[in-house]
Image: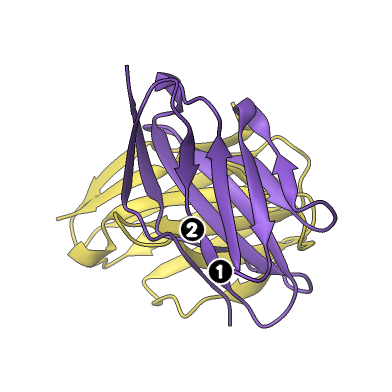
Amino acid sequence: AQSVAQPEDQVNVAEGNPLTVKCTYSVSGNPYLFWYVQYPNRGLQFLLKYITGDNLVKGSYGFEAEFNKSQTSFHLKKPSALVSDSALYFCAVRLSNDYKLSFGAGTTVTVRA
Amino acid sequence: ETGVTQTPRHLVMGMTNKKSLKCEQHLGHNAMYWYKQSAKKPLELMFVYSLEERVENNSVPSRFSPECPNSSHLFLHLHTLQPEDSALYLCASSQGRGSNEKLFFGSGTQLSVL
């Protein structure tokens, strides 16, 4: 079984400040980890993924995420948030030998000007 | 645009109605998915089709009936739904079902069951 937890329903930050969206996962094997973003009235868009290699993964729109195996975490980060980053963010996990993608419940990010 | 188009964008139906949701992908992908998105809950995987064959039916009630006539089109037929079925229904596609493949999502159909 595999699952993802996003412990914060909402994250509020001021524009220009660092943004962190937390994600922890639980799998019984090697995880492949993903972040997706959903803007209002739109479907989910892929941001980045961790498959193997460097623990720090860089993605779209200046986002990055760090894979931490010991803490089973994959937190999403952006050094300087923009108002346009306000959206719903989903973390997701797959086993390396499976196609089922399990999503977290999502974190709503609000960046105030 | 993601290359995945869903129609209609909004749908209101009574519990005795029959309706269908449509999804079309223009990406040449060979795997397609239906997800259900409810507020404050993880996305629920409903069905997966690979090369037009259903490979996953995630304990979804029979009032939801998928159809995949070819690799570009996916339908979700709805009948005798319940109010708790009100949600955003998302279609997605991917190139293969490999575990490192990313999904491309449509904008969804917002369904309200009265």
Q: Position of residue A19 (x, y in %)?
A: 47, 36
> Three-letter amino acid code at disc 1?
Tyr
Q: Nearer the viewer, mark 2 or mark 1?
A: 1
Residue identifier under label 2: B35
Q: Which residue is mark 1?
A: A25
Give the amino acid at mark 2.
Tyr
Q: Which mark is residue A90?
A: none
Quarter occupied by residue A11: top left
Q: Which chain is yellow?
A: B
Kindly give the residue lying farthest to the top in the view shown: A113
Q: Are callouts 2 and 1 both on one chain? A: no
Q: Colour of chain A?
A: purple
With respect to residue A22, does A87 lie above or below? above
> Dot 1: within a 10 Å radius of its alpha carbon, few (fewer than 14), some, or many (20 or more) residues?
many
Residue in view at x 41 percent, y 68 percent: B64
Instruction: Name the spot of residue A34 as percent of width and height, x first.
Output: 63, 53
Q: Nearer the viewer, residue A105 or B8?
A: A105
